[in-house]
Amino acid sequence: MTMRPKFLLTLMAVSLLAACMTVLFADTQEPTLKDAFKGDFLIGAAINSAQIYGRDTAGDALLEKQFNAISPENVLKWGVVHPEPDRYDFDAADHYVALGEKYHMSILGHNLVWHSQTPRWVFQDANGKPLTRDALLNRMHDHIQTVVGRYKGRIQSWDVVNEALNDDGTLRQSQWLKIIGPDYIAKAFEYAHEADPSAELNYNDYSLENEPKRNGAIKLIQQLKAEGVPISAVGLQGHDKMDWPTVDQEDATIEAFAKLGLKVKISELDIDVLPSASQNRGADVSQNYELLAKLNPYAKGLPDSVQQDLAKRYADLFRVFLKHKDVVTRVTFWGVNDGDSWLNNWPVRGRTSYPLLFDRNNQPKPAFYAVIKVAGQDAGKK
């Protein structure tokens, strides 16, 4: 049967409209962080057990869409993966690595040696007495060999030593330091390199933007490099405030570590919009303060004015990161959305915090678009 001309014209018009709608839809797709900064640095997120085990399907969908790198909040810390002297529990860690491989992401291991979340038994013998130096070194070696060795070639980067410095730049008086001595840091890096020679090895800490602590880290890293210790990057945790660090502090800090021949990672980025509970501006997990109404002013939602301030703050920081994209290799947010953030419970339990780019419903906030805009402005300069 021959089609009538009017029918053919109508059919062609419908097809043309459908094609136009397809193009229009493609042009209005939500931008993604990983695409916006492609060729600049990786964009990561720290993920929790619900995301690792697939219970948070919405969070996983956002993770896959927006990010190309992951860090584990807890599942590779000593207390989780090695809870008893003769027992390792790799179930969660195995799921974590498998998730990263499923989404073709860069996978980071966090962390191997830390003063916190390390069981008391690690530093004691069978009678509860402090271990000798050699015994603790052997225990550290076995742990690193077992954990790093299990994921050799699958985890590309490790936070080997975490938070070894005090705010004044001196070495923290941890059990590692007291029993082994200052060279425990070098030994940890040597053991990690032995377990996986191809892995990138990081020193990770908070508040390195403050000059005394930064100077202490610079001195430590210079000594490690002089001894031939295989350290390749420093992680600036980036647990920031609305007024700290300044743009100049961030810029100077990245530049200082770049001059040491290191790559730089913004490893645990979030921006706290809530009032400070104390004068301490660090990220010491042992801090804990009483919940008061004045410390939780946005329990019913973040005002638009604060949303805009947060957006500007993120944009300012990302301009600094892009300025140093030759050495900044990864920017990782500490959580996927606001509901995941540790800042809801630290240093005051029960607060409602808003430190990330996505809200509790996984929707982009003004800060997200501000960061995307910065990427576009930088792309225009290329």
Image: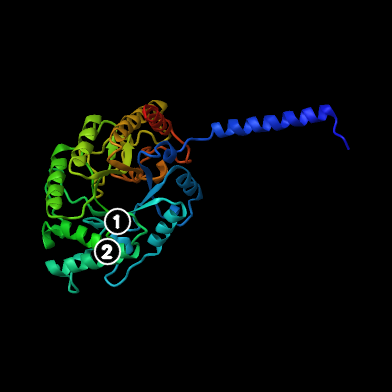
Q: Position of residue 67 (x, y in %)?
A: 42, 44
Q: Disc 2 vs disc 1: Cβ atoms closer than 8 Å? A: yes
Q: Position of residue 349 (x, y in %)?
A: 33, 45
Q: Position of residue 257 (x, y in %)?
A: 20, 41
Report whether 41 appears left or right of 253: right
> What residue is disc 2 on?
195
Q: Position of residue 307 (x, y in %)?
A: 39, 29
Seen from the viewer's position, the closer of residues 228 and 77 is 228
Please tell me whether residue 220 is drawn above or below residue 380 in the rendered image: below
Seen from the viewer's position, the closer of residues 319 and 263 is 263
- Image quarter (top left, top right, bottom left or bottom right) of the N terminus: top right
Residue at 42%, 34% (x, y): give it.
Answer: 368
Q: Amino acid at mark 1?
A: Ala
- Crowding around mark 2 (Cα neighbors within 10 Å: few <14, some 14 to 19, many 20+) is many
Q: How is the image coloured?
A: rainbow
- Among the 4 quarters of the image, the one containing residue 4: top right
Numbered label tally? 2
- Crowding around mark 1 (Cα neighbors within 10 Å: few <14, some 14 to 19, many 20+) is many
Q: Amino acid at mark 2?
A: Ala
> What residue is disc 1 on?
199
Report if residue 20 is visible in the image.
yes
Q: CA distance from mark 2 to mark 1?
A: 9 Å
